Image: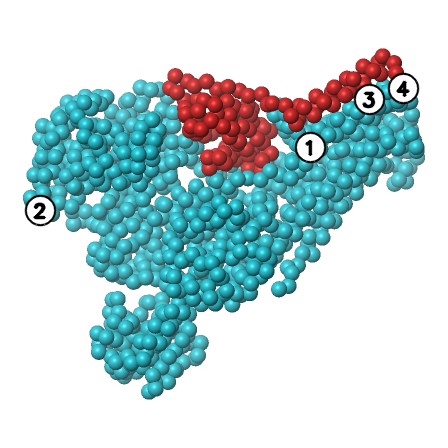
Chain colours: A cyan, B red
Amino acid sequence: MAKDPVCGMEVESPSEYSVKTKGAKYDFCSEKCKNDFLSNPDKYIKPINSSEATYNISSKGIEKLDIPIIGIHCSSCIPTIESEIKKLPGIIFAKVNITTEKARIEFNRKKVTAESIIGAIKKAGYKTGQSDLSLGIVDMYCASCVTKIENELKSLPGILSASVDLATEKAFIKYLPNLVNIKEIKNTIEKLGYKTIEPAGAEKLSSKKTLSEKEKTEKEPVDENKLAREKEYKTLIRKFIFAAVLSVPFLIISYPDFLGLPEAFRQGAPTLRYLWIAMSILSLPIMFWSGSQFYTGAWAAFKNRSANMHTLISTGISAAWIYSATATFFPEIFPKAELANQFFDAIAIIVALVVLGMALEIRAKGKSSEAMKKLMGLQAKTARVIRNGQESDIPIEEVVLDDIILVRPGEKIPVDGVIVEGSSLIDEAMITGEAIPVEKLKNDEVIGATINKTGSFKFKATKVGKDTALSQIIGMVEQAQSSKAPIQKIVDRVAGYFVPAVIIIAILSFVGWYDFGPQPNLIYALIVFVTVLIIACPCALGIATPVSLMVGVGKGAENGILIRNGNAMETAQKLNTVVLDKTGTITEGKPLLTDVITTEDFSENEVLSLSAGVEKASEHPLGEAIIKGAADKSLTLHEPKEFNAIPGQGVEAVVGEKKILLGNIKLMKNRSVETGDLEEKSKKLADDGKTPMFIAIDGKAAGIVAVADVVKPDSKAAIAKLKKMGLEVVMITGDNKRTAKAIARQVNIDRVFAEVLPPEKAFNVQKMQNEGKIVAMVGDGLNDAPALAQADIGFAIGAGTDVAIEASDITLIKGNLKSVPLAIELSRATMKNIRQNLFGAFFYNGLGIPVAAGLLYPFFGILLSPIIAGAAMAFSSVTVVSNSNRLRRFKPKSD
Amino acid sequence: MSADQIIVTLLGIALSFLVGWYFWFSEKKAVKIKAADSGVQEAFIKVKGGYSPNLLVFEAGKPIKLTFYREETAACSEEVIFSDFNKKATLTPFKNVTVELNIDKPGEYNFQCEMGMLRGKLIVE
C-alpha cells in the first residue's frame, strides 16, 4: 500500500495512476490527484535524498535526450531550468535552446531516468510534451520477449519509459510525441516479430479497464457476443421446430377416443402400441437435444443447491418419460390397464413451448449497449496542429497540452482548450445541452467534440486525452451502466420454492400410498410419485413472461415507445420520480421567434421584415429563427447589402435603402442609438428566458425582436399527468437559473436544478436514488447520457443524439413528453399481466397435484390420467396466451 | 403397520427433510482460494448453466483475479455482474475473461448473471 501524496488516501501500489519522478514513485487514487501533483509536485513531496533512488534500467551508457519545453518566453528562464536539471545525479550536460524550445540533456542512464529529468523541468515551472500510449501486443510467449521489447523501445529517441506486461499482453509507453510517433513505436515492436493491436480510442481513454479486460484489445468482442447470441437464437428455434412438429402427431395419437380416430388407433390395439414405441424413441431427441439446456441447467443449479425453472422441467419430463416408457414396454406391471398411460405429448409440448419462450427472451433482450462506440465516434479523429510554425494533421492521441490547434468552419474541435486567435460561433449542444450556439472570442474556452459553425480560430489545448469533457462523460456512462443491479426473473424466484416443495409432496405421497394404498402398494406408490412430478411442470411456464413482454414491447412500439429490454419493462412500473432535462425535452430545443416589440414610428411587420432581411446574410442560428418567423407571416424580404458582422455585438447591413443595426444593447450604445424604454422591456423578456435583440433603423431605435427556446405543446399536460400518477417531477438543466425558472413556471414544475454541469446531472440522479427513490431520467443530449445511464430508467427523446438513445433504456420516438406517462402505464399493465400469467400457469397444474397425489382416489377412484394432465397443460397455456392477448387492448388512460 | 412400512415412512420423512434442507437451508460448499507467490489470489470459474465453483473464499486485502470461461452460448450467462463493485464483464463464449477485484473489507459479495438466474458469492475473510 502507498499513500496518495495529494489527498492522503491509502492506495494500492502500483496504482493505475502512478508517477515516477525525482527519484521516487508516487501512487494516486485518481487522475485528478495525479494531475494536481504533476502541476506542482513540490507542494506534495516531502524532501527525500534523491541519491537513494535506484533503478533497474539496463545500461546503455550515456544517453542523449532532446525534450521539447513548452512556454519558454525569455532567456532569463533558461538558467532556472538548466540548474534544476543539473541538480539531478548523473547529468553530464544540460542546455536549453530558446529558439528550438528544446532542452538537450546528456545523462547517465544508471543514475537518472528521463522521467526524473522531466520532473525537474516541471519543478522549474515548465511543461514538457509527453503522451501515454497503451498498445496490445500479440504472440508474446516468454518473459524474455518482455525485456527484448522494452529494451528495443527504450532505445528509440523520445521514449521516456516502456513497460510490457506479459499477462495482459500490453505495452505501456510514455513518449514525447514531437520526437516519435505511434507508427514508429509500432514498427519497432513489429520488427521484433510481434504483432501490435491498434489502440482503440476507447481503450486509451478508459484506462481503468485496460488492465483488467484483455478482451477489449481483441478485435470486436461485442460482435462476437452478438454472433453467439444469434447462433443461440437460431439453435433454439431449430430445437423448437423439432419438438413442435413432433408434438402434433403425439397429441393426436394420445387422445384416440376424444378425436374419434379409427379402431386401429384405439386403446389396446396393436397399431397403437407400435406407435407408442415409436413415440417413446422419438421423445428421446426431444428431451436430450431440444431440451438439453434443461438438464445442464438443472444439474448446475443442483450443484449450487438451488432449483430453478430448468429443474422443474427436467424432472417433470424425465418422470413423464420413465412412466410412459414403462407403460409402453411393460404394461403388465400396472395393476389396472387404464393406469398404463402415456405422457409423450406432454413432453413434446412442454419442451417446445419452453424452448420457444427462451428464444423469445433472447429476442426481447435486445442489443447490448453501443453507447461507448457512439461516444467515441463523436470525437474528432485528427487535429490540425501548428508546431514550429508548420501546420500538420496528427491523430488526436498525439495532441499534447499547449499545442496550438487550428479549427476551420464546420469542423469538430478536437480537444478542450482556450481560443488564442480568432472567433466563431460554436454549437455546444452535445456537451452543454444549450440549444443556441455560443459566440466565442479570444480567451474563451472551447470544448472538444463541439462543432465550429462559422469562423476559423486557433486555440491552445488545455485538456487532452482522458481529461477532456467528452472523455469524462464517456467514463461516467461506462461507470453508471455497469452499476445497474439486475433483477432476478420471477419464474426462477417462484421455481426456487415450488420445485423442492413438489419433490417433498411427491415423497410424502409415495409414503402415503405405500402405507395406506391398495395392493400392489409399491407400484401404486411409484405411480403416484412420478405423476406428481409430471403434473407439477406447467407447459406455459416458459412462455408466461416472454409472451407478455413481447406484446407489451409491441404495444409500446405502436405508441412510439421503444423498450430496450425486459428489465426496463419491469423497472418502469416502480418509478416514483421523473427527472426531466429542459432543452430539447420540455422545450423544442431550437430557438423560435416569440416577440416583436416596436416603437411608435414603426410597424411590427416592418421591424420583422427588416430584421429578417439583415439576417439573410448572417449565419447566426438566432437569425434563422427570425427569418422563419418572417416567413410564417409571409413577409417579403429584401436582400441585404454591405453586410458586416460585429463580433460580440451583432450585425449591420443596408436593407431596402435603410441602414439597419441588429444586436445587443452594447451595439446600440456604441452607435449612440437612444433606446428609451426598450431597455426596460428587453430586461423583462430576458427574465422570461428569451433572447432579445434590438433593431435600429437609420440610427433610430425601432424595436426588439426576441427569440427563445419555447416549451413543446404537450409538455405541460404530460407533466400534469405524471404528477397525477403520483410521480415527483424534477427539472434539471445546464442553462442559467433565470431561463430555467421561467420554463419551470410555464409547465408547473416546483423542483428545479439549474446550471448543472453534465457530470453533476448524473450525480443529482444518484443523490435522489440514495434517498431511496426510483428515478427516471428523460433527456436527449450527449450531456444527458451519464444521467440516462445512471437513472433506474433512462428515457431518450427520439430526436436526440444517438448517444443518448444508446445510454437509455427506453426511446421515445414521438419526441414529446406524453410518451413518458404512457410508457409507465404500459409497464404497469405488462407486469400485472405477467404476474397473472404465472398465476395461471401454476394454478391449473397446482390443482392437478392433489389429483396426482391420489386425494380423489378413495372417493372416485381417479388417479392422474393423460386427460387431466393434458387438460391442465391446455388450460394453463390458453390462460397465458389469451391473458397476454388482453394486453393488446391496452389503452392509455385518458387525462 | 408392518416393518417395511415403518422403514419407508421414516425414510420418506427423512428424505423430505433432506430435500428441504438441501435446497433451502444448507450451507453451500465453498472453495478456498490461496494466494500465489505474487500475492494475487487467482481463481478459475467455469460458466455452464451456473458458476462452478460458485462460492469462493478469499483473503481480504490481496488482489483477486477471477478468470471466467463460458462453456455455452446460452444467452443467460452472457454477462457477469458484481454489483457491489460496479463491475460488469461480458463473457465471450469459449474465451477466458478476467475480472480483477480488490476487496479490503471482509464480507460476502454476490455476483450473478444479468437475469439473476445464475448466482455466485465471494466470501472475503
Residue under numbered circle 1:
A497
Q: In which chain is the residue bearing label 1?
A: A
Place residue A349 in its image quadrant: top right
Whole-percent x, y for residue A485 in the image: 53, 40
A168 with respect to B21 (left or right): left
- Residue toward you, A418 or A414: A418
Residue under numbered circle 3:
A511
CA separation in Å, label 1 and label 4: 33 Å
CB-based contact (under 8 Å), mark 1 and mark 3 = no
Which amino acid lies under the numbered mark 4 shown in the image of this protein?
Answer: Pro
Seen as rendered, the residue at the extreme bottom is: A601
Numbered mark located on residue A520 in the image = 4
Q: Residue at x 46, y 63 (%)?
A: A744
CA separation in Å, label 4 and label 2: 109 Å
Which amino acid lies under the numbered mark 2 shown in the image of this protein?
Answer: Cys
Closer to viewer: mark 1 or mark 4 = 1
Counting residues from the N terminus, which is met first, the one under dot 1 or under dot 2?
A: 2
Closer to viewer: mark 3 or mark 2 = 3
- On the question of residue A251 being in view, the answer is no
- Residue toward you, A727 or A792: A727
